[in-house]
C-alpha cells in the first residue's frame, strides 16, 4: 500500500486531500513519524524521523495520532482482496504482502494482469492506491513494488532479475543499512550490479556469513517460498537520538517508551513474545544486541523490566546513537501463559486495553508512565555495571 496510514486518513477526511499529512506522535514530543503522505514527503518528511524534526521541516503539516484499530480494519479488507487471487498470501506487515500466483494464471491471467486486477479492486472497494511488483521471487518483487510509488506496477521478466537490479543503489538490498552501505562505498561498491561482480570471499571477509547472502540477492537469487499465515518473526521499535548521548536516564526513559509502543503493537495484533532484545548502536556505528527469554508477554512494564536488566549489564564506553527494543518468539496471546501467576493480571490487561484505546484516539503520548512525564523527578539511575 502507498503511505498507508496517511492515505487512510486522507480517504476518511476529504478536507485532507492534497495536504501534507503526518501520522505519529505529538509534534511537541520526542516520538517519531509513523507515516507521511506524499505531500509531506516533498518537505523531506519520512517515516521513523523524529517528530520534532518533521515539525521543523513541515510546520504547516497536519499532524495526526496513530489509529491502529482503524488501520487494522482496512488491512483486513485489503488482505481479503489478495486472498481472492490465491490462497498463498504471506503478510509482510499491516500494509504489505507476498503472493504466489503460480497456479492462478488459468483463472486470472499472467502476473501483470493479476497485478492490475488487484490494484483495481483495492481502488474500487477500499478507495486506496496500491503499488505492485511482479517477479519470479520475493526479493525482486519487493524491490519492483517500491520503484514507482504511488500507484505503480513494475514487472520483471523471469531471467532479467540481474539486469533489473544492476543500476540500483546497494541500499535497495535487504540487510544494507547506513553502516553496511558506508562499508560497501569504502570498497568502491555503489550499485547492486557492482556488488554482484564482487568475489564472495571478499564479501565474507568484510561482512562475515552475511556477505554471501548479499551476493545472492545482488544477483537476483532468492529461493524463499511464500509462506501463508506466517506469523511475524518479531515486533520492535528503534530511535536514533538527535545527538549522541551518554545520558543513562534518557536512554532508560526511551527504552520505557519503546517498550510501551511494542506492547501496544503486540496487543493490537494478538501476539505475545518470549524473547526481549536490546539493541544499542554507538557513536562509531558499532552495534551490540542483548537478549533475554522468559514467559510470553505483551505487557509494556514486563518488557521494560527485561530490557532494562539487559541495559544495566552493558558498560557504556562511548555515546549512544541509536537504541531499540524488540520482542520475538511470537505466538498467539491466547496460546500461552501470560503471567498467570500474577494476581493482578486481569486488572493489568484491562488497564492496558484502556490505554490502547486512549492512545488510538489521542496519540501515543496521551497516557504515559509517570517516568516519561517531562519534568518529573526520577530516582538517580544506577550506573551500568562492569
Image: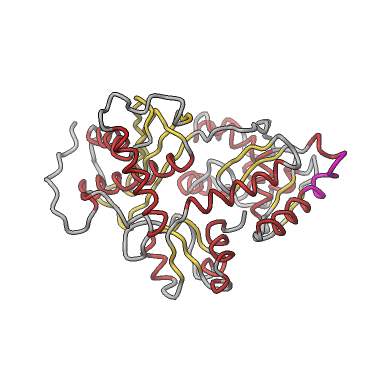
Please state the horizontal and vertical placement of residue 120, each as a whole percent of the image: 75, 56
Q: Is 104 left or right of 343, judged from the image as shown?
A: right
Determine which quarter of the picture holds residue 213.
top right
Q: Nearer the viewer, residue 137 or 219?
A: 137
Q: Nearer the viewer, residue 214 or 258?
A: 258
Height in image: 13 above or below 139?
Answer: below
Determine which quarter of the picture holds residue 52.
bottom left
**Residue at 26% across / 37% down in the picture?**
308
Determine which quarter of the picture holds residue 327.
top left
Q: Which residues are magenta?
A: 106-114
Please state the horizontal and vertical placement of residue 252, each as a whole percent of the image: 25, 45
385 magenta-colored:
no
**Residue at 58% across / 52% down in the picture?**
74
Please state the horizontal and vertical placement of residue 139, each as a whole percent of the image: 65, 41
Height in image: 146 above or below 42?
Answer: above
Please state the horizontal and vertical placement of residue 119, each as a whole percent of the image: 73, 54
Q: Is 142 left or right of 337, judged from the image as shown?
A: right
Q: Nearer the viewer, residue 128 or 275?
A: 128
Height in image: 385 above or below 366?
Answer: above
Quadrant holding the C terminus? top left
Amino acid at each position: 500500500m502507498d503511505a498507508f496510514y496517511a492515505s487512510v486518513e486522507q480517504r476518511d477526511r476529504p478536507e485532507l486531500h492534497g495536504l501534507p499529512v503526518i501520522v505519529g506522535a505529538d509534534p511537541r514530543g520526542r516520538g517519531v513519524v509513523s507515516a507521511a503522505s506524499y505531500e509531506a514527503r516533498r518537505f523531506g518528511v519520512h517515516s521513523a524521523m523524529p517528530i520534532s524534526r518533521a515539525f521543523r521541516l513541515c510546520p504547516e503539516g497536519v499532524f495526526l495520532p496513530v489509529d491502529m484499530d482503524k488501520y487494522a480494519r482496512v488491512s483486513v479488507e485489503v488482505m481479503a482482496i489478495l486472498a481472492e487471487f490465491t490462497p498463498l498470501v504471506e503478510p509482510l506487515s499491516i500494509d504489505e504482502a507476498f503472493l504466489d500466483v503460480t497456479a492462478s494464471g488459468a483463472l486470472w491471467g499472467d502476473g501483470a494482469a493479476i497485478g492490475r486486477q488487484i490494484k483495481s479492486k483495492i481502488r474500487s472497494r477500499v478507495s486506496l492506491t496500491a503499488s505492485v511488483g511482479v517477479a519470479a521471487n520475493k526479493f525482486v518483487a519487493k524491490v519492483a513494488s517500491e520503484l514507482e510509488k504511488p500507484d505503480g506496477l513494475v514487472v520483471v521478466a523471469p531471467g532479467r532479475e540481474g539486469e533489473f537490479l544492476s543500476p540500483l543503489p546497494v541500499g535497495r538490498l535487504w540487510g544494507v543499512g547506513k553502516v553496511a552501505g558506508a562499508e560497501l562505498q569504502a570498497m568502491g561498491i555503489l550499485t547492486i550490479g557492482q556488488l554482484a561482480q564482487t568475489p564472495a570471499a571478499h564479501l565474507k571477509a568484510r561482512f562475515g556469513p552475511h556477505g554471501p547472502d548479499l551476493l545472492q540477492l545482488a544477483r537476483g537469487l532468492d529461493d524463499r517460498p511464500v509462506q501463508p499465515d506466517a506469523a511475524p518473526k518479531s515486533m520492535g521499535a528503534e530511535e536514533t537520538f538527535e545527538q549522541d548521548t551518554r545520558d543513562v536516564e534518557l536512554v532508560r526513559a526511551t527504552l520505557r517508551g519503546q517498550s510501551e509502543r511494542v506492547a501496544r503493537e503486540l496487543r493490537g495484533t494478538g501476539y505475545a513474545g518470549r524473547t526481549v532484545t536490546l539493541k544499542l548502536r554507538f557513536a562509531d556505528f558499532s552495534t551490540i544486541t542483548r537478549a533475554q527469554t522468559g514467559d510470553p508477554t505483551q505487557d509494556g512494564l514486563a518488557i521494560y523490566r527485561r530490557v532494562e536488566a539487559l541495559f544495566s549489564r552493558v558498560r557504556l564506553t562511548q555515546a549512544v546513537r541509536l537504541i531499540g527494543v524488540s520482542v520475538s518468539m511470537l505466538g498467539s496471546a491466547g496460546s500461552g501463559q501470560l503471567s498467570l501467576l500474577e494476581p493482578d493480571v486481569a486488572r493489568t490487561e484491562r488497564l492496558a486495553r484502556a490505554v490502547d484505546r486512549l492512545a488510538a484516539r489521542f496519540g501515543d503520548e496521551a497516557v504515559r508512565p509517570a517516568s516519561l512525564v517531562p519534568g518529573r523527578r526520577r530516582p538517580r539511575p544506577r550506573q551500568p555495571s562492569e
